[in-house]
Image (tube, rainbow, N blue to C red):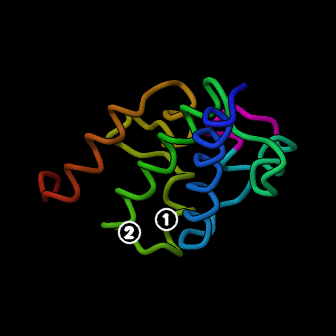
């Protein structure tokens, strides 16, 4: 891997670290959304390993979704909210939706809340 590729990928871990400073998500929640092993999550958080491939994509989507939802839900309430079943998702869970590639559906939901489409 090139030095520039490593830096760009490690930046994804930095996004996660920055998010956790604002939203206290658990490593289990991160693992569930990204389909990464809990040991891998710890390696990202300790900057020993850079996210790559599908895990990096899911991690980026998780960070973007949680950042958007933080506009509507307090940071301390958000970790519980993303770990429950949501009627808009046909009773599905945001973490599972992310893991299954449903980022676009989730971001539509977040934008709907932000712009008061949902009541």
Q: How many discs appear?
A: 2
Q: Residue at x 64, y 61 (%)?
A: 17
Q: Quadrant of the N terminus?
A: top right
Q: Is residue 69 above or below residue 77?
A: above
- Give the image location of residue 39, x and y in percent: 87, 43
Given the current orientation, which residue lies at the most extreme front position? Answer: 3
Q: What is the secondary structure assignment of the residue under circle 2? A: loop
Q: Are marks 2 and 1 in contact (CB under 8 Å)?
A: yes
Q: Is residue 32 above or below residue 55?
A: below
| First to last magenta residue range | 31-37
* Residue 78 numbered tag: 1
Q: Give the left or right position of residue 112, taking residue 45 as reference.
A: left
* Residue 20 is a magenta residue: no
- Give the image location of residue 6, x and y in percent: 68, 37
- Give the image location of residue 24, x and y in percent: 62, 69
Quadrant in the picture for residue 113: bottom left
* Residue 19 numbered tag: none
Counting other residues with Cα less than 10 Å from the Cα at mark 2, is it few (<14), some (14-19), or many (20 or more)?
Answer: some
Q: Is residue 68 above or below residue 109?
A: below
* Residue 36 is a magenta residue: yes
Quadrant in the picture for residue 116: bottom left
Q: Nearer the viewer, residue 60 or 79?
A: 60
Q: Earlier in the sequence, mark 2 or mark 1?
A: 2
Q: Which residue is mark 2?
A: 73
Q: What is the secondary structure assignment of the residue under circle 1? A: helix
Q: Give the left or right position of residue 68, taking residue 100 as reference.
A: left
Q: Residue at x 58, y 46 (%)?
A: 12
Q: Nearer the viewer, residue 118 or 43?
A: 43
Q: Nearer the viewer, residue 16 or 115?
A: 16
Q: CA distance from mark 2 to mark 1?
A: 6 Å
């Amino acid at each position: 891997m090139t030095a520039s590729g490593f830096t760009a990928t490690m930046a994804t871990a930095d996004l996660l670290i920055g998010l956790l400073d604002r939203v206290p998500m658990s490593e289990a929640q991160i693992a569930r959304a990204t389909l990464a092993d809990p040991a891998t999550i710890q390696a990202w958080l300790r900057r020993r390993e850079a996210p790559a491939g599908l895990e990096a994509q899911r991690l980026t989507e998780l960070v973007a979704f949680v950042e958007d939802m933080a506009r509507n839900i307090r940071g301390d309430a958000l970790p519980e909210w993303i770990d429950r079943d949501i009627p808009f998702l046909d009773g599905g869970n945001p973490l599972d939706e992310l893991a299954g590639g449903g980022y676009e559906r989730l971001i539509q939901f977040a934008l709907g809340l932000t712009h008061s489409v949902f009541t």
